[in-house]
Every structure is written in C-alpha cells, then in structure tokens.
Image: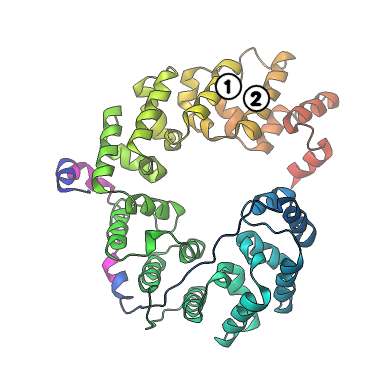
Amino acid sequence: MYSLTFCARRSLEFQKWRNLRVSVQNAFALFNSFSFASASDLSLRDGRKGNNFTVSYLVNSLGLATKLAESISRKVSFEEKGNPDSVLKLLRSHGFTDSQISSIITDYPRLLILDAKKSLGPRLQFLQSRGASSSELIQIVSTVPKILGKRGHKTISVYYDFIKDTLDHKSYEKSTQGNLKNKIRNLSVLRELGLPQKLLFSLLVSDCGLVHGKEKFEDSLKKVVEMGFNPTTANFVLAMRVVHGSRDKTIEEKMDVYERLGLAVGDVWEMFKKAPSSLGISKEKIENSIETFLGLGFTRDEFAMMVMRYPQCIVYSAEMVKKKNEFFVKKMNWSLKAVVSNPSGFGYSLKKRITPRCNVIKALMSKGLLRSKPPPMSSVLAITDKDFLNKYVMMHNDKQLVHGLMAIFTGDRVSLTDKKAHLEQ
C-alpha cells in the first residue's frame, strides 16, 4: 500500500479492504481554479492570570456552568470586565442572543480578548459590506466564530465565501490569489466527498498542515478512501491526519509490529478503521503497550484479541492500564479472561464511571443482595447510567437502601429526587 515492497508483499490481502470507490481526481478537477489570500491567526494570550475572575465572569455574564467556565479559563483569561463587556455589547447590538453568544464564546473563547472597537467591530462591518444580512451574519458567525479572529479583508472574504457557499449548498468558483488556495481547494474536495460541515469548518479555521498542501493531501486522501473510510465520519479526518503525518516506511514498521503480535494484515487495517490512533502512535509506544499488557499476565493471543475488539487500549499509558487492571482484577475479582472479553473497560473513567458503579456492586454483595461473585463486567460498566440504576438500585423496595446506594453512586453530589427526575427525562 505504501512502498513498492510493502505493496508487493501485501497487495492480495489488502484488495478486499478497498470497498469505497470515489473519483477523487474528478473532485480535485472541479476546484483547480481556486486561489486565495493568505491568513494568520491571533496570537495566544497567557491564560494563567485572572483565572478566578474569568470563571466568575463567564458564569455570571454568560450563564455558563462552572466546570465549563473553568475549562474555558485554561484557554483564555482576563482580570477585568471592560473589554469582555464591550465584546458582548457589540454582539448584542448586531442581534446575537445571549444563548448564541454563550455558544460562540464556548467555541471560540479568545473572542472575549479581541478589541471590540478596533478589531471585532470592523470585521463585523466588513462581513456586512460583503452582503451578509443580519440573519446570515448571525448564522455564519455562530457556525464558525473563529472567522472573527482572522486578519485581513481578503482572508475574511475568502472564509466568508466558503462558509456561506457551504451553508447554502451551492457550487461556485472564485479566482483570487494568495496562500489559501490549496486549503480552500482541498476543503472543497472534502465537501464534495460528503464531509460534514462541522468537520469542514474545523479544518477551515485550524492551523494543521493536513489541508495546506496539494500533492501530499491528494495522496493521503486517495489512500484513506481506498482503505474504505467513510467520508461522512470524524474517523475519516483522523485517518487522514495519521496517513498525512506518517512516512510510508514508518507505517510499514508499525504494521510489522502488529504482525509479530499475530495479527493478519486485514485485521490491522480493520483495527485502523475502528481507531485511526492505533497507527498514529509511535512504534515504540506500540511495543511498550504490548510489554505492559504481557507484564500484567495477558498472553500475546489475548492481547491481540483485545486490540482487535478495542484498538484504543493500545494508546493508553502504562500507568493508567495498570491502575484500572488492578481495580478490575484485585478489587472486583474479575478474571483476566473477563477483561479480555471487555477491553473497552480501559476506556471508562475510573473516577466517574468505574469506581461509583463498582462500589454499588460491592455494597450489594456485602449485604447479600447479590451472589458472592460480581456480575459480568459488561452488565456493570457497558450499560448506561439509567440502565445501571434501574438494574441495581431502583429495583429495591427498601427506600433507605435505595437512598444509600444512590449516595454511593453519586458521592452525595445529587439527591435521590434529582436523580429520579433525571432518569424520567
């Protein structure tokens, strides 16, 4: 697939995975006339100062949840409300609702540190001068708020045209000049293949090199299409990132590691389709992960089976894998065989999912309400919160017992009444 030697050695096995036939060349031909202006992003502000003030402002002025506000404060921070207030006032004056503004700031927090008078205002005015009605302006900025972080009228104009065209589902051809030529051309090709707007716009405003080039982008796209990735999914973009950022020799070396583990070539490609990150990590990381699982007592065949079922497990750190496996095997007395059958357990949060649920199970076992052995891993970890509570908590007639189990499950963070209301939604 990647080098002549690699292709010659595996071509027969690989053919069966070529299950998506798309004329990529034709899609490129439609957009060869594109040529666009260069762009540059705003420089990052130091988000370490004024975090407490930022969180308080986001909660009080925008109504954001504290946890979300804390997350945003790690990306951008400020110590006074003058500029953020000016930004919010300006957006409201253009017809944005508080709900829309909250979504915009959540998506692009740096908007709050733009100069409302010198930067943000002129950019909004320019978009209006391009013919955007009030409703179109609100739709475009709400969809891709980072357009207001772009510098230069030519750049903003190109972004506006592409976004508006995509939202309107029309085809068009423009002829301008600049460094955005390949980026817009490549995004247009991805749009023709069916890549969703959300993913298109994410690539549009990003600085990743994936959509900047021409020949390498086209080569990466062809490979991912031939592998059978669905262009309407996020995995399609993830796979392109992996292929685009890897040399042929590097991918071949990783393939060899998986083959030595006992996986067939077709199995590896199928695994890659499930989780592109399984080929995105380094050869050393793959080898270290194998050593980690073998060191925990799993056989090579068992680990190969786990990787096929849940490829993401090879990406996790050794520390995390050991910690969760110890919990499964020593605290819950699940066998290694049970873990092999449920490798997705390594993907669940120890704090938010594994520990609360397992503590409920241990409490029920201690009261003799469950048999001496814990239920299967899948019936404890894989089901939804609602199903778990209905199966192990709400079914009891003893209200005091239910209340106690809910306290264990929630850590006393949520009342029983609130939890019941949540389950009824």
Q: Is residue 77 left or right of residue 163?
A: right
Closer-to-camera residue (30/398): 30
* Residue under pointer 2: 358
Q: Position of residue 334 (x, y in %)?
A: 55, 18
Label located before the other in sequence (2 or 1): 1
Closer-to-camera residue (237/204): 204
Say which residue appears at 58% left-offset and 21% top-offset. 327
Q: Name the disc covering residue 327, or none.
A: 1
Q: Is residue 182 positioned above or below 312 on the image? A: below
In reply to whether residue 112 is colored magenta, the answer given is: no
| Residue 136 visible somewhere in the drawing | no
Q: Is residue 121 left or right of residue 175?
A: right
Magenta segment, prevailing SS (helix, strand or loop): helix
Q: Position of residue 194 (x, y in %)?
A: 42, 64
Q: Is residue 106 left or right of residue 297?
A: right
Q: Position of residue 127 (x, y in %)?
A: 57, 81
Q: Quadrant of residue 118?
A: bottom right
Q: Position of residue 100 (x, y in %)?
A: 69, 67
Indicate the secondary structure of the residue bearing disc 1. helix
* Segment tinted magenta in the rendering: 10-26
Indicate the secondary structure of the residue bearing disc 2. helix
Give, as a three-letter code, the residue at label 1: Phe
Verify CB contact (< 8 Å) between mark 2 and mark 1. yes
Say which residue appears at 64% left-offset and 12% top-offset. 372
Q: Is residue 248 positioned above or below 390 on the image? A: below
Q: Quadrant of residue 230?
A: bottom left
CA gap, disc 2 and disc 1: 9 Å
Q: Is residue 369 left or right of residue 205?
A: right
Give, as a three-letter code, the residue at label 2: Cys
